[in-house]
Image (cartoon, rainbow, N blue to C red):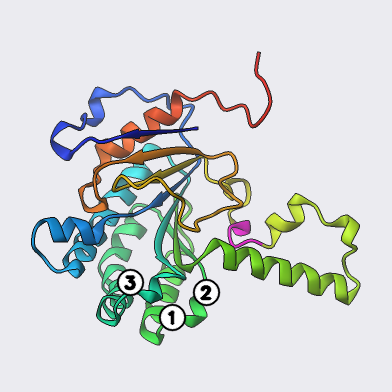
Amino acid sequence: MFSWFNKTDSDSPSDAAIQLDPTNIPGHVAIIMDGNGRWAQKRHLPRVAGHKQGMNTVKTITIAASRLGIKVLTLYAFSTENWKRPNDEVNYLMKLPVEFFDTFVPDLVKNNVQVRVMGYIDQLPEKTRGAVERAVADTKDCTGMVLNFALNYGSRAEITTAVQQISQEVEDGTLKPGDITEATIGQHLMTSGLGAYSDPDLLIRTSGEERISNFLLWQIAYSEFVFLGPHWPEFTPALLTEAVYQFQQRKRRFGGLKK
C-alpha cells in the first residue's frame, strides 16, 4: 500500500501537530533521496549544489530518525546505475562521503548512531572507500540507530550476486537445491547483517516520483510506501514524522487477514 502527498516545508505540520504512537514506530525506514539536481536547477544553481544541500539534509534527518526511535535508517546514496551520469557530477558525488563523514562522525558518535554501508564498495575510488571504512570503524561501538548507506548499490546486482553464491554452494555440495528457501536467499543479501530489521517497514521516496529504481526489490515485498512531493533538500523532520504517521494508519496484514 502507498500514499502520496505534496507538502512543502512551509505547510508541513510541526512535530508537535502529530501525535505518534510510540509503540508503532517502524523499525526500519528506507529512503530514496530523490530530487537534489532538480532542487538546484529550480534555483538556477549547478546540480552539485543540490547534492551539497542534500548532504546537510542527511545530517538533519539522521538525528531526527534516531530521536523518533527508528532502529535502522537506510539511505539510497548512489546506485550502480548512477555511474552513467556526467563525469563531473560523479566525481563530486564520490567526494561527498569524505566531507560528510569527516564532519559528521563526531555527531554520530554523540548520538550513539552506528554507520553501516552496503553495496559494491570495492569499486569505489580509494579516498571514498577509505572515508566509508573509517566511519564504519569509528562508530562500530555505537549501539543506537543504524545509519545504513546503500552506496554503489543496485538490487538486481545484489540478487544476481546472491544467486551466484548460492549456486556455488550447490556446486560445492554444501547446499542441496531442495533446501533453498526464502530464508536462504535473505541470508545472502546485503541486508542480512541487519537481522530482524533486514526488511524495511516503511519506504519513502521524495521529489514526487513513484518508482522503486532498483532499490531493495526483495526486501520491500511488504513495505509500506509513502511518496512525497518535496525534493530531498526540502525534506524536514516534520515530513519524516508525517510519513511515520501515515505508516501508523496502515493495516499491515502481510497477505493474510486480521480479525
Res. 120 mark: 2
**Residue type, mark 2 in image:** Tyr
For marks 1 and 3, the one nearer the N-term is: 3
**Residue range of the region highlighted in magenta in the rendering:** 189-193
Dominant secondary structure of the residues highlighted in magenta in the image: loop
Q: Residue at x 39, y 76 (%)?
A: 83
In this picture, is 240 found above or below 212? above
The picture places residue 146, in percent across and down from the top left corner, at 46, 54
Quadrant of the snapshot with the C terminus: top right
For marks 2 and 3, the one nearer the N-term is: 3
Label 2: how many Cα within 10 Å (few below 14, some 14–19, many 20+):
some
Give the left or right position of residue 42, taking residue 56 as reference. left
Residue, disc 3: 97
User: Viewer-proximal residue, 42 or 36?
Assistant: 42
**Residue type, mark 1 in image:** Leu
Q: Residue at x 30, y 48 (%)?
A: 61
Give the left or right position of residue 185, taking residue 191 as reference. right
Q: Residue at x 18, y 55 (%)?
A: 39
Q: Residue at x 25, y 81 (%)?
A: 88
The picture places residue 137, in percent across and down from the top left corner, at 46, 71
Between the C-alphas of marks 2 and 3, the distance is 15 Å
The picture places residue 133, in percent across and down from the top left corner, at 45, 75
Residue, disc 1: 124
Which tag is nearer the camera, tag 1 or tag 3? 1
Between the C-alphas of marks 1 and 3, the distance is 11 Å
Res. 250 mark: none
**Residue type, mark 3 in image:** Pro
The picture places residue 211, in percent across and down from the top left corner, at 43, 49
Which tag is nearer the camera, tag 2 or tag 3? 2
> Pointer 2 and pointer 1: residues touching (CB < 8 Å)?
yes
